[in-house]
Every structure is written in structure tokens, then in C-alpha cells.
Image (tube, grey):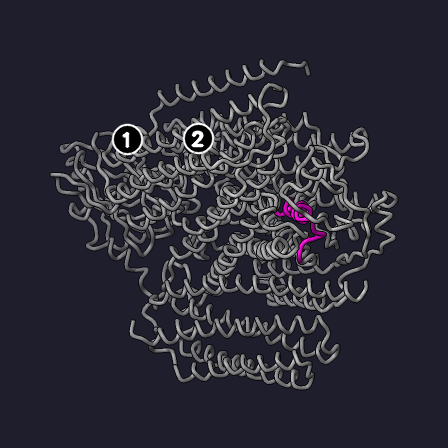
Amino acid sequence: MPHIKTSYKFAILIASIIAAIALAAWYISSHPLAVLAPMGQIGEAQRNLIIVGALLSIIVVVPVFVMTIVIAYRYRESNGRAAYQPTWDHSPLFETIWWGIPCAIILALSIITWQSSHTLDPSRAIASNESPLAIQVVSLDWKWLFIYPAQHVASVNEVALPVGRPVTFSLTSDSVMNSFWIPQLGGQLYAMPGMSTTLHLIADQSGTYFGSPANITGKGFSGMDFTAKALDASDFSQWLATAGRSPHKLDLSAYTALAKPSQDNPTTYYYSSVEDGLYNLIVMKYMLPDISRVTQ
Amino acid sequence: MNNFMQMIFGRLQLTEAFPREPVTAFAAVGMIMTGFLVIGALTYFKKWRWLWKEWLTTTNHKRIGVMYLAVAGIMLVRGLADALMMRTQQATSVGSAHGIVSTDTFQQVFSAHGTIMIFFVAMGFMFGLINLILPLQIGSRDVAFPFMNATSFWLFTGGMILVNVSLMLGGFSSAGWLAYPPLSESQYSPGVGVDYWIWSLQIAGIGSLLSGVNFLVTILKMRCPGMTLMKMPMFVWSVFGAMTLVVFAFPILTATLAMLALDRTFGTHFFTSGGGGNAMMYVNLIWAWGHPEVYILVLPAFGVFSEVVATFSRKRLFGYTSMVVAIWLIVLLSFTVWLHHFFTMGAGADVNAVFGIATMLISIPTGVKIFNWLFTMYRGRIRFTSPMIWFLGFVFLFTLGGVAGVLMAVPAIDFQVHNSLFLVAHFHTMIISGVLFGYFAGLTYWFPKVFGFRLSEKIGRYAAWCWIVGFVVAFTPLYILGLMGATRRLDHYSASLGWQPLFIVAGIGVGIICVGVGLQVLQLLVSIILRARQGKPLNDPWDGRTLEWATTSPPPVYNFAIIPTVTSRDEFWEQKQTKRRPAKPMYQPIMLPKNTPAGLLIGMLAMAAAFGFVWHMWWLVVIGALSAIIVLIAQSARDEQETELSVETIARIEAGEKYA
Amino acid sequence: MNNEALILHEQTVHTKTNFGFWLYVMTDCILFASLFATYAALRGNTADGPSGQTLFDLPYVLAETLVLLTSSFTCGLAILATNRQHKTQAISWFAVTMVLGLSFLALEVNEFAHLAQIGAGWQRSGFLSAYFTLVGTHGLHIVVGLVWMTIMLYQLLQRGFTAGVRRRLSLLSIFWHFLDVIWIFIFSIVYLLGVLPS
């Protein structure tokens, strides 16, 4: 192996790092990242938090990086001119600085954390002039059922949202623990059997957004992505009408058939009517004693 | 006849249990053939007696340490193979293509990958290094309970074997490395996979718990005269903190695994969906163990860095008291943050905020440690040996990963990145650059002490660079993917998402890491083959500071013929500076723990009982457990567990006439 | 090794073993704490089945408690005899402790069998799973203690009061008293709180 001068090695290293960062930056600019380019108010607030948090962290990161490089270079063994103090091992001043400054940063972040945990609590209603739309979500094996209780329609793997109107999602599961996530609109929340959790989201722009399960549910987990369509008022009414014209009706027997395990379900599956109180029935059924499993 | 067969074999049906899928079957066959090769080699070279006497029945901490490292190293290769498989699958399984393995195999692979890396690689390297170095650093002859030490190792190995047996017989869990219910309950995971997971962790976990007790008693009761707590090397302090965590956290794991086992085997309702079970309770319990676990792994790695940085800067560790306080703050705080693993489970704003703030607090003592290391280097004389390269890689990567962690500590941010590849990238950053780089640095640093010759520095540096570069190439795409909305554990995704290029880059990164590992293996082989060239074993190859460097390389079986008396920190360094000469030695007879097969037997019998539990072979459970207990009782009842080494023998060993 | 070195060696072994055993007992506390926490979480999950109010028979539990507490007392007497190296007394008191321990177990097994018979077994509900596991784990520890006591009685008869035997007897008594303390928690948290209307 030919001997390469150390300074050349470092030059190559720095050049590679710059090239890599440039590549990543180019990639990110041409492929918008859902979490950093949200389409709804909640997602926006979350993205702003990420930016604030990252900036606060830079206060520590930059000094650490600079110090590491400078110290490593200056105090390398071959540099005889650098001071050598082998027994100097404490300094109240420096300790105060590097305990104090991180404490201050964390204090700032703590206040932000406390506030944002409350303002962005998933179960907190979104302030708006528009009345919220209620959608009930059931995680099944391996598809998502969306019930519109006020409109008496339902859909599988496709959820339509009216633009600019807050949506109250009630989440549950009729199988294992899952998580309901539309990255471009905002954060996720777990959907669990026997429980109903509440997630508020809002879409501020129309578009078709990617929806994802976010907690492993078994074999069909990968095929459980869904589509979230943010539609303006007239398109939304049309969507409801289309669903209302579906020949399928979600009564109890249809639901039982739907709940059977299936993978990679087709997305455009609508129901024109829904059994009254179906969602509550699904939640409550786990409250009963599990007699069938006693004999296992 | 049928009934009889069912009683003997439980629910095991040999023809069905062996894997069908080509990749898995190939791996299984490969493992079996390797096993035969090893047995064949031992027989051909007539090494069985040597193996039994020197390794299988040993109670010596140095031997046990080497065995831990060997198991951990082999499991690292297995874990990396899993990682390669996952990266390849995720790089190729797009749109109409479905990758190289089935969904079921993929899910087993990522579950096995996490389980093996945490429980058998990281814990293995940790216990290996602690075993090797802790007694030497405190001037003691062994750990507090040598027999229990051996038992811990064999329980650990029993768990490891069980995980690998699952590949060949019946399949592993598909429920992730933590097996959340309801997915891990028998209703949704009816096979043996989750049971293998439960029982291999249960026996390995008991081994870990016993080690925790063992090392705590060692530190607190066996330090040499003059070594007050505040004179201990920082590595010892870090082990003290980590073992305290072990002792508090592992019983929670034992209880939780037992309850899940009861649910699966006997139909109880701890975590089931109906019947009054509460799956959220499992999530709380498992993370109440799980979070301290990651600090258990990283604290000794931090301890290694403290030793490495001080030695290779030829300078005292900066801020000793501050570092000690930082360790204990980390220990304390690590028990207050577990909920940050499930902010998205809906605990409410107040609870989420409190745990988020607690999580952020841990970054303070961690940051303090980094500054103290940097200031140890400041005004020192730094030698850039490969341990220092590992350390520098750690500083850069761990800081960035820590930023990601602080961001995720804000619950509202976590809602957008929980369970995504952003999370996966974060924890890999912490574990690889923190835990793994730390233990790699420790291995390189202490290798000459343990084996009497150095590892090739040149190859070591190349390996470190491969790991650092490979890590960046492998995990930066994952951070980006997470922010693009990619969740973890997907074995297939649609082409329109535009994720594939990033997955391909990540795959290349893992390839670079594999080159790094290949170099590490090469480094080992080359160093072994060329070791004669290094001449006489150097007791103190790095100009070290702490007591382990005062012994020969490798140390004699009893470590110190005369137990040293210590008057300061970095005692060995001070001795060298003042050229203190110890008085002419007056040897006393030394008591050494005897070899015993009991540890091996207990470990293997426990493994057999666990195997029986998995397959409902109740006779095996009863016989295995009872036999293990009988062996334990018989061993404990032995009054003569030590042999005496005479003064003459000691004198001869010290004079170099006799190898010990 | 000379006498002085032997005594020092034994002292070191005793210190380490004692401290190590206390550490182990602490880990066992954490194990029980996890089971207590689970019990607390699942206390109300009766799945339309029987609750503690219906099932728990306080007088019966009082009998169990008195038996176990007395066995702790007799264990203490046995250790006092050990310290004074009165072999017959020590063996007798340990034997009484064992009989009391076995009686406790018999009462507990009887209670469990009765519950299982009336359809309140551990598969019935989360509450019952947690109850049986918490109390049952304690019972398993009692079994371990009794087995250990049997072995120690055997060693005492065979070897007399050697240093090793005395050391192990003191560890055994720590273990036995620890189980008593755990029982007091069970008595209070499970049974006393359990019969209160939830």
C-alpha cells in the first residue's frame, strides 16, 4: 500500500464529507420529506418543534465538533510545541460551563416540551370555526376500516378528509396493537383492542397522502398502508355520494367477514350503510370474559 | 402409541419443524455443518481433554471472559448476516418484486437480529470485558463468586444456543425483539417462535442477574488495600453503575417474561385482549426493564473510553468526581424515563411531558462526560491508536445520535417519528457508536494483556474507518427515510414512494461495515499467526495507568502474587513516575477456586428444560429443572471448593519458570 | 494455610456471601414488586367474574398469616440455638419451622384448589391471573425455603456446626424472614384491600 501523506488523507476525508452532505442535501431538496413538508396544521407545528429543537441542540453540537477536531489536532503527540500538563485534571470553571449550558438548554427545551405536549396532545380538539368531522378507525388484520358515523358510510383502506375542517379520529383495533399514521398531516396514535383513543388532525391542502401502520401487527403488516385523500368541500360531498351508492352494506355479518384475516386488500372498497353503534360494539367486545380461551 | 409419542415429543414434529425456505434451510444446514466441523477438529487434534479442563469446567474469571468474547463475536457475525438479509430485502422488495425472503422469514430475521445483538453480542462483550479486567483493576485475584460466574456464562450460552436452535427447529419469534402482546399472545402467534424468545431470554437473563450480584460484591468487598472508592479506575465505577442497574432491572424482565409465558402456555390473562388482560401493562413492564438495559450496555463502554482516552493522552482523566456523579445521575435517571418508548400509546399530555423532560435530563450528564474526555485530551500528548479512532468516531456519531434522541424526547415530535426508520437510525447510532465502538476499543486496548501479544494496529485502524464510514452510509438514509414517513419492519413497499434508492445506499453501507468486520477477523488471524515476531510479551504495551498493566501479559492464574497496596488513583502510573520499587516479595500460599463441571451442567440442563417448555415436552422440563437444582445443591454443599497454591509454585511462576 | 489465614479467609467468605445474599434478596424484592404492580393494575379486571370481595376469606388468611409469622419466630429461635451451638435445640426448632411452613403451604394449596373448583381459577380473569401468580410465586419461594431447610437439617446432622453450615443457616433465616415480610405485603395489599368494595 503506497504511503499517503496524512494531510492528503485528511483532505480526502473532508472532501468526502462535503460531497456526502451535498448529495444528501440535493436528495432532500428534490424529494420532499413528509414530516418536514407537512400539509396540515398539526404536522406543521410538529415540524417547527423539530427545527427549534435541532437549533437548540446545535449550541452543543458545534462546540463539541470544533473542540474535538482542534484538540485532537493540536495535542497530537508529534506536535512538540503544544503545552503538556499531564496532572491537570479538574477545573471548577469548566465544570460549571459544561454542566450549566446544557442545563440551560434543557431548561428551555423542557418548557417547550411541557407546552407542546399540551397544545399538541392528540386528544385535544383543534380550534376552528368549522365543526369537526368524526371518523372512526378500526385496525383489522390487515386493513383499515374507516367509519363515518354521521354520514353512515364506511370505506376500507381509503379515508377522505374535507380540507380545512378538523377531523376527530377515534381509533381502535379488532386484532393486535397498531398505530395510525398519516405522516404528511401529523403524528400517530396507537389503536388498541378494547380501547378507543382520540387523534385530532386537519388537512390544510388538498392532495392524496400516504397513510401507514406504525406498529408491527403480523404477516400482512406491510400491505396495510392506506390512502388519505384531502378533498375540498364539493369533492368531499362527491366522495360521500360515491360511497353511498356502493352495493355493500356493513352489517354485522359483513363486518365479521371483513374482520377475517386478509392481506393486500384493494383500496377502493366502500359501504353504503353501517350497522348502528358498530364501533362501540367492536370496542366493547373485549370487555367480556374470554370463555373460549379457558379451555385452550 | 400416538399418545406416547405426543407425550415424548410434545408439539414437536420433526419433519415440519425444519425450515423449508431456501435461505433459512441453507443457514440451518450451515450451522449444523460448522458444528460438526468443530467437533471433528477437536477430535482430530485430540483437544477434548484440554477443552474440558481449561475452558468448560473453569471458574477463572479470565477464561470465562474469553469465552464470553468468543460467543459474542460469533453472534455478531450472525446478527450482521441478519442485517445484510434485511437490507437486501428492503432494497429489492419494491412494487411487484418481493425480495429475497418471505414475509414470515423477514419478520423472524428482524426479531432475531435485535434479540441477538442486544442480549448476546452487546451483553456478551460487556460481561467478557468486565470479567477479564475488573478483578485486575481493583487488585483482586478473582470475582466474589467464581462458581456463580461460570454458571452465569453457561446460562448465557444456553440462551444463545436456544435462539440458534430455533432457526433449525420450528422458527423464531416474528413479533420483534420485545414481543408486544397481543401479537405475541398465542392467539396471534400460535407457534413456538415467541416461546423460544421467552425462554432463551429467561435463562440468559438469570445469568445476567447473577453476574450483576457477583460484580457488585466484587467491587464493594474485594478491592485491594488502599483502594478507596474514589481511587477506583473509572471503568470500575462504570461497571458499578451498570451492575446496580442490572440488579434493579433484570428481575422485572424475569417477572414479565414469566407472565407472558403463563399467558401463552396456561391461558392466563395478564396481557390478552380479552378476559381482563391489559397489553399496555406489558409495554410498561418491558420498557421499565428495557430502558435501564440500554444504559447497562453503554455505561461500561463509557468506562472503556475513560481508560482509553486517559492512557492515550498520557494524562489524568479530567474531572474524576464529575464523571462519578455523572454515572450515578445516569443510573438514577435511567429508571425515570421508560415511558418515552411509547408516548404514542396515549398516556396524556402531563404524563408524556414529565417523561419527556426526564429523558432530556439524561443528556446532561452524558454531555458532561464527553466534555471531560475532550479536556483529558486537552494539553495531553495524544497517540492515535485504533482505540482512539473508535473513540473519535464515537464522539461525532454519538453526539448526532444524541441530538436525534433529544428531539424524540419531545412527545409532540415523537408522534411523527415513533417506530419509523428515524427511530431505528437513532438507536443504532447510540448502540453502535456508543456500545459497540466502546467495546471494540476495549478489546483492542486490553487484547495484549489477555493474550500476551498485540493486534495489528494497521488493520485495526482500517477496520475502525470501515465501521465509521459504513455506519454513516448505512444509517443516514434511514434518518431520511424516517422523515419521509417510512415505518420500521416493512418487508415490502410501493415503488411510488421513492424509498428504494435510499435503501440501496443503506445496503451499501452495511456492505462496508461487513468489510470492516472482515478486517477485524483478518486482524485477529494475522496477529495470531505473526505473534512470535512481537518478541517477549509486553506487560505494559501502551504505557498504561491502572493496575492491570502491573501484571504480566497474560497475568498468572492468581493475577497478583502479592496483593498490591494502593495510595492514589492511577496507581501503576504513579509507581512508574516515582519509580517506586515494591519491597522484596514475601509470598503466601494462595487459595484458588477449583474447576467444576457444575456451571456447564446447570447451564445446559436449564437450556434443556427451556427447550422442553417451548415444545411442551413436560418430562424434559421437570427432569431438566430438577437435575439443574440437584447439581446446584451438590456443588454448594461441597466444602472443598478451592485448592491451595504453595509458596514454591508461586515463586516459580513469578520467576517465569512455570507457566500459569 | 495457617490458622490465622484460615480465619481471615473464612471471614472474607462470610462477608462476601452475606452481602451477596442480601443483594439477591433485594432483586427478589424487585421481582415481587413487578408482580405487585401487575396485580395493582389488574385488580379491577374481573371480566364479569368474581372479585376479591366475593372470594377472599379473611379468617382463613389470618390463620395462614399466624402460621407463617410463628414459623418466622421459631426460625429465629433456631438461629439463636445455632449461635449457641446447641445442636438438638437447633434441629428441633428448624423442624418446627418446617412443619409450620408445610402447614402454610397446605392451607394455601387448599385455598387455590377450592378457587379452581368453583370456577375462579387463574384463567378466569386478569385479576385472578395476577392473584394466583403473585401469591403462588410466594408459595414457590416457601417451597424453595423448605427444600433448603431439609438439606440444611441433613448437613447439620452430618457435619455439625461447621463454618459453612452456620453461614448457610444464617442465609436461610434471612430468606425465611424475607418471605414473611413479603407475605405481610400480600396480606395487606391483596387480602385486606381486596375485601374492600372497589
Give whichever of A222, C68 is nearer the camera: C68
Give whichever of B213, B597 is nearer the camera: B213
Horizontal placement of A66 versus A264: left or right?
right
Which chain contains the residue that carries disc 1?
A: A
User: What amino acid is at disc 2?
Assistant: Val
Q: Is residue B135 magenta?
A: yes
Among the 4 quarters of the image, the one containing residue B618? bottom right
Among the 4 quarters of the image, the one containing residue B313? top right
The structure residue drawn at horizontal position 51% and vertical position 33%, both measured from the top left corner, is B87
Q: Identify the residue at the far left of this view.
A: A129
Above-or-below relation of B357 to C183: above
User: What amino acid is at disc 1?
Assistant: Pro
* Residue at numbered disc 1: A38
Give whichever of B229, B74 is nearer the camera: B229
Q: Which mark is residue B94?
A: 2
Magenta residues span B126-144
